[in-house]
Image (spheres, helix red, strand yellow):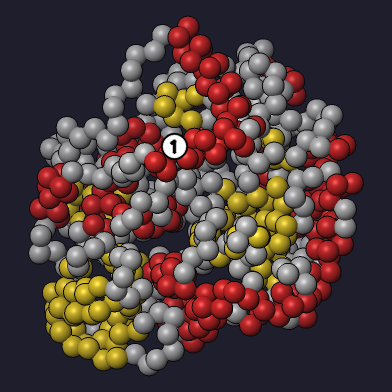
Amino acid sequence: MAFSQEGAERVAALGFTCIELPISWGLPPELEGNHLSLFQSAVQHYHRAGVQVYGWLPIATCIPRGSYATQAWYALDPYGQRIPNQRGYYFTALLNPIWQTVITEKIQQLTESNADGLIMGGYTAGGTGLLWRGIPLGPIGSYDAISQEQYAQVFNHMAIPTTFSSKDPASQQYLKWRISTATQVIQQWAETARHQNPALVVQLGVPDAIAANHYLISGLDLDVLPDVDIVIEPPIWSHHPPESAIITPTISISASHTRLASVIPIYGGERMGSAREFQRNLSEAVALNTSARIQGMGYYYKNTLTGLLHSRYKPQHEALQTFNLWLDQQHNWLHSRTNASPLAVYYPYEATHWQWNPTSQQFIAICQTLLLNGYPLRVVGDDKAWDDVRVLVVPSGSVVGLDERLTQFIAQGGRIIAVGQKRLKQSPLWRDWRPQRLKPPIWHWLHGRIQRVFIVARRGYQRYRWVRRGISYLNKRRPQSVSMPPPALQGELIKAIGETFTPRLESDSPALLTIWREPDGTQQWHIVNYNEAEQRITLHLGDLTHGEVYTPGTLSPPASVVGSSLIFTVDSAKIVRSKG
């Protein structure tokens, strides 16, 4: 239905202004049949309905069938084997000129179809790895002949490493080169697209760079991405209620904003969400001041692939339609705002490249602690302004120039709370916390053998569906848990911030609080309820405040409130606005 006139009219009726459709599935042209003509027809259908179309194009994987089966553009592991991705896809080598030509031709097809945007999806620079107790494993990158030759030319005939360590200069040299060369290829494709259509919106779909060390395993550096909008793919963390919502895009989006001007999260997965879940997801995006993309495909009903546009999802349709209408009505005061939280967490992105454990785990745990205890979530980085911040929580990790910035912050009346590492002679909190077991000592010869076993095992996991299903079945039967900071450590951080700190929330289950200021000084407090049912939430403001309370996604007028502590029954979300 998504490619039909009926689908276009239904998307427009839901209030969406843009839809993402695949221009290619990664199959050779002879097996994709008339898919290109379907895409071109769909662009016309949606344009008549007043909806823009962005074409999704896989740039780093394809399916080796038909004329693609014998091509030499595939990424190879150290043993000369192609590197499989899940569901029949294999990684490609971005440096291969023939593969670059294939993508360039598909970009030309997209621009000729009059599409409004290009989404280069599934970004990875060759094979992806995995961190096991701090040890990088897997076919990281590609060992194809072209990659090997280019690397040897740049680095005096050196070979690409077969084992990796975050402290090894040779490993760091290769990983930086891998990121740099892949980024150049992506930039060339983006420039090609814009040259053919200067008005074309170009976006890059990337993995959640905060949930895992994608600098190492996927070849992704948020600081050197090409000049395109970034679409954050779903987080790799598992969902475990009630903490699940704390481990969803909230922390990742907030941290990504410290490096990127535009972050677009994707909400949805293999299971169709309820109408309430869609409302909460969109309310979360509003609370984080970002756009959102709803996953509309991949849903099954009675073993039949349906998609979000299926008529059986009428409650979800009504919720999305109403929310989009509400967004249009409130656009003026939601559009222009800046973060005004007096409490913030510093994200040491530069340190996470080589000091992933414990730096990133500490950062995530700090954010979890704030969310669990009702404190506002705001993340700052090196290049963004720290306006209005009075208290800054700083995890461990070495970042160039950080001490000077902190010294200036303190001189201006700010207060820092150091976690895991002494800062400016200040004794840190959480000195003895170990979220993961220490990295075991691994000798080089043993590391090489572990690496080989892991590559073979992962190849089997990605190639054979029955292996994945078996492991998935065992995971479902195994008791699940989420690594949260122990209550004693949470209490230690909360005490350091101040147990009477305001603004903050008081609730039985986790909730998100963000604080914003409009250009005229009007304050906004956004509350998102992460409980599975509505709950009573108190917003402590400290000062007597007169404001208006909005319920995102409902068309009822706002209600007036007065008080220093405001009590609400919150289903999905609430927003309080006050002119002071």
* Quarter of the view holding residue 395: top left
Quarter occupied by the C terminus? bottom left
Q: Residue at x 63, y 14 (%)?
A: 159
Residue closest to the eye, 356 or 491: 491
As drawn, the residue found furthest toward the front would be: 302
Q: Position of residue 387 (x, y in %)?
A: 31, 63
Residue closest to the eye, 515 or 301: 301
| Vertical arrangement, residue 522 with respect to residue 301, above or below | below
Q: Position of residue 131 (x, y in %)?
A: 44, 29
Q: Residue at x 44, y 37 (%)?
A: 474
- Residue 548 in sight in this render: yes
Q: Which residue is mark 1?
A: 474
In this rendering, position of residue 97 left or right of residue 164: right
Residue closest to the eye, 33 or 367: 33
Amino acid of disc 1:
Leu
Q: How many marks?
A: 1
